[in-house]
Amino acid sequence: MTRMPGSAAVALSALAALVLAGPAAAQTAPDILTYRGADRSQRILDGARREGQVVLYSAMIVNQALRPVADAFMKKYPFVKMRFWRADSEDIAAKLSAEIRANNVVADLAEGTGVGEYLVQANQAQPYYTPNIERIAEKYRDPAGLWTPTRLSYFSIAYNTKLLAADKAPRSFDALLDPQWKGKMSWRIGSLSGTALFITNLRMAWGEEKARQYFQKLAEQKIVNFGSGSARTLVDRVIAGEYPIALNIFAHHPLISAAKGAPVESILMDPVATTAATMTVPKLGKNPHAAILLADFILSTEGQEILAGAEYFPVRPDVAPLAGLDRVVPAKAGVPENFIGAEALNKYNESSERIFQELFR
């Protein structure tokens, strides 16, 4: 997820400004991106062979995911050289903004939580079609075809199992209001996957009035605002015993650490906030055939299995996550899920941040 909503907003504003910058920004998508004819595969292969390269900007971890994806893709399509650049989503948006401004877009595909949303809002995303989208649940798709989901994220609390027994840990949002947790909980600030997502989840699920009343009570718990690292870093602090409980962390992070002997565990709460990293084809890209070939590959069974092996949650239901991680998949755990897609993230983020500033700062 992006780190700083303020920085992300700057990147988005820069992108949006480019819509009026000149005729180049209004280019239409190449036909191949949305082509569905019987010879689609051959046309894509022929075009990708001519282009000979493809560039992916992504927020995925390099050694765990990006390098294995590139190696497998180039083994399958040796006539296309795949290059990638890894950064947090806000930095990807900023780099794309600069490239569009210079009329020199290097990326053929952009992937990450938030990146697609920025491009869509700035009218810089091209519609595209991949047959693999039919294998993905409709609730995770974009009706306009401007982005496709690549991987899912589920959010939970984490708690230190040395400091809290399993039967004493809070298992509902209401349980977080117990006075015994006052000053003992932490959450990430300055991140779309931290406080903003926590607040947005309950506003969407409960409605504004009930959620507001809850936030006012939660504010009395004096939650520690953690802003000095990633979601992974906050889990590490829970493991170290600095905070007994962390709110709204990636649900699989504690499981990965617990499997290595760390004293930490996840608890899903009803409803489970769920987001998706998205993949977008930016306008002005130089290799549309290779771009759609790579998009097809990432969403194929083979591509999704690589992401599963990298400890991500695949979007395809026919590709299982790593053994041991499936217990934090809401559908398998029997806990209701609240999917917060691109439109909702954009709609609620600013107002959720205002609620945080008012009540929790």
Image (cartoon, rainbow, N blue to C red):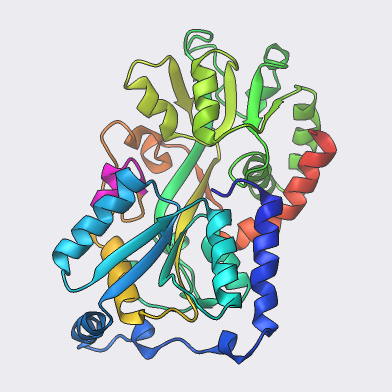
**Residue 293 covered by magenta stretch:** no
Q: Residue furthest right?
A: 358
Q: Is residue 138 left or right of residue 210?
A: left
Q: Residue at x 65, y 62 (%)?
A: 11
Q: Judge by depth and name the residue closer to the eye, 210 or 223.
A: 223
Q: Residue at x 50, y 78 (%)?
A: 104
| Vertical placement of residue 165 versus 105, above or below | above
The answer to whether residue 132 is seen in the rendering is no
Q: Judge by depth and name the residue closer to the eye, 207 or 164.
A: 164
Percent coordinates x, y for residue 136 in the rendering = 35, 61
| Vertical placement of residue 253 versus 240, above or below | below
Q: Residue at x 66, y 27 (%)?
A: 174
Q: Is residue 200 left or right of residue 89?
A: right
**Residue 312 covered by magenta stretch:** yes
The answer to whether residue 279 is seen in the rendering is yes
Q: Residue at x 37, y 68 (%)?
A: 55
Percent coordinates x, y for residue 339 in the rendering = 52, 52
- Quadrant containing the C terminus in the rendered view: top right
Q: Judge by depth and name the residue closer to the eye, 115 or 67.
A: 67
Q: Which residues are magenta?
A: 305-313
Q: Is residue 209 left or right of residue 276?
A: right
Percent coordinates x, y for residue 49 in the rendering = 21, 81
Please give the count of numbered marks on the rendered protein: 0
Q: Judge by depth and name the residue closer to the eye, 192 or 341.
A: 192
